[in-house]
Amino acid sequence: MKMTTFFLLCFSLIVLSAQDKPTDYLSADFHKERRAKARSLMPPNSVAVFFSNAERNRSNDVDYIYHQDPDFYYLTGYKEPNAVLVLFSEDHKTAEGKVYNEIIYVQEKNRRAEQWNGKRLGVEGTKEQLGFEMVFNGSEFQKSNIDFEGFDKILFFDFKNDYRDTRNNADLFDLIKTFKIKIDYPSDYNATRQQIYSMITSTEIENSANVAQTLGRYLNYYEDLKSDNLLAGYVDAKDNDKRKEIQDKVSLEMKSNNLNSFLLAEIMNSLRETKTAEEMVLLKKAVEISAVGQLEVMKAMRPNMSETEIQGIHEYVYKKYGAEYEGYPSIVGGGNNGCILHYIENNKQKVGNELVLMDLGAEYHGYTADVTRTIPANGKFTKEQKLIYDIVYNAQEAGIKASVVGAPFQAPNEAASEVVAEGLVELGLISSPSEIKTYFPHGTSHYLGLDVHDKGTYGPFQENTVITVEPGIYIPEGSNCDKKWWGIAVRIEDDILITKNGPINLSGMAPRTTQDIEKTMAMPSVLDSFTLPGLD
Ligand code: GLY
Ligand code: MN
Ligand code: MN
């Protein structure tokens, strides 16, 4: 073989193997820019520390499929466990004079571990693929000389205590243990108390009576905070002078350490609420995949199918498009099962002639959809089913219309609830709108993104925010109404992009009106001829 032919062959092999994996992930530049944005929101002379998600055991020596913490993924693109990201609000210098404002500690490369559990990026891979400059193995975290005491604020999310110590001496357990020692984390640290302290110190004294009253009600749910003398004193204080005195003591107490476990949530909420163009490509794809899943199931649905089988068709469509996971456990509830809001048993053997509520979302490169359709298993809505369906449909239309820039977060819920209440009263299912919760017990909207219930500020809607609009009516068997309504459960859920030109329904590809659903269900399906041998 000639040398040039040999090099050409090697080159094509490299290109081919590079194409072997998806290439449409978020770019290193995206994560870098997000870190810069996070840094710009940090207070002066502060440090923010993020930990990767814990690995969790499923059975014996098998763990649950690992899923990165969405904040960690958003800021780094790193998908492995046992990692720490440290962001500094200002530039720092190494002894050699190198300027840096971030450090990431990652899993060490290990041939044996990688043969069992898959490749690791390691220090070099993290530098090359994710664009970090200061990268160390996790074991170096303990030896790091970050002067935590010297910062005015150390920002972190308080620990969920749901991680285990393993044989790995740089696992999440060890990294957090090291961090707690480094920051002098008090054994009785209480993140909720810190947040309430902060609220007290930032309250104008003229408003303190209101805050004290609300706090009094709140403390009834938190036994461990009731015994806090400062909080109890603030709640019991008779006048503003007394509250001011306690406020000063709270300020002093807050200055006794530099730990802050609530500001990071505010920063991440505000960053993640609106989506960049790069994020939208992935989020749109997740939503469209899920809408196609609904469409294909409408064609394939037969009364003799089981809930599990229906779930499998949706999920097969997701995989066919390359979506790695589902964004949350799939919900497929036939008849009365649809009344359980997060029904995930999905084990009814035949959906029969009932409505089937299907709430599923593909997760594509981290971004998840959340789409619900409710369809009659035999292809035709009954009169009662259609009456309920149309109320939910009209409520959803009103909710979508209210999803505009500048509207309060509650606007879609208020618009949809009004339509549902009116409809239920008209059908005699409730006697007054105030009883709406009997049959519509949940809210109408949440943010959507890396988390199915994504982070956001709950302030007025901003452009490039994606929310769900998902009203529902659920009439469980045994409800206090005519039996003809029992077992009817309808939720319609779409993923709505808020733009300055109005709302855009990203999941509109999945039929939504009763007419379109019935028309689609009458179409042939590729699965009509997909039969498998019977098993003994
Ligand atoms: N699938 C969960 C939800 O709709 O919020
Ligand atoms: Mn939802
Ligand atoms: Mn849902």
Image (tube, rainbow, N blue to C red):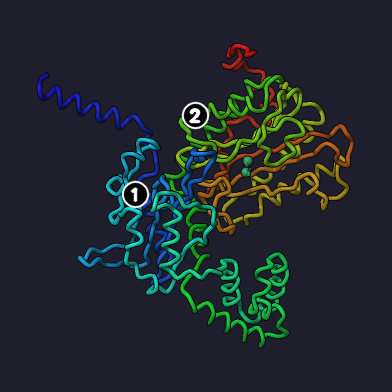
Q: Residue at x 71, y 64 (%)?
A: 221
**Which mark identifies residue 29?**
1
Q: Please give the label number shown on residue 435.
A: none
Q: Amino acid at mark 1?
A: Asp
Q: Is residue 427 visible?
A: yes
In the rendering, at what x and y percent does residue 261 appear? 51, 65
Q: Quick one: SS at disc 2?
A: helix
Left or right of residue 319, residue 104 in this image: left
- Mark 2 vs mark 1: give the one in front: 2
Rendered view: 92 above or below 303: below
Q: Position of residue 385 (x, y in %)?
A: 78, 31
> Where 68 falls versus 232 (above or below)?
above
Could you tell which of marks 2 and 1 lies nearer the N-terminus? 1
- Dot 1 lies on which element? helix
Q: Is residue 5 left or right of residue 61?
A: left
- Of the four image quadrants, the one with ligand 3 is top right
Image quarter where the C terminus lies is top right
Q: Residue at x 85, y 44 (%)?
A: 425
Which quadrant is home to the N terminus? top left
- Locate residue 357: give its quadrant: top right
Q: Are marks 2 and 1 in contact (CB under 8 Å)?
A: no
| Residue that carries the numbered disc 2 in the rendered image | 319
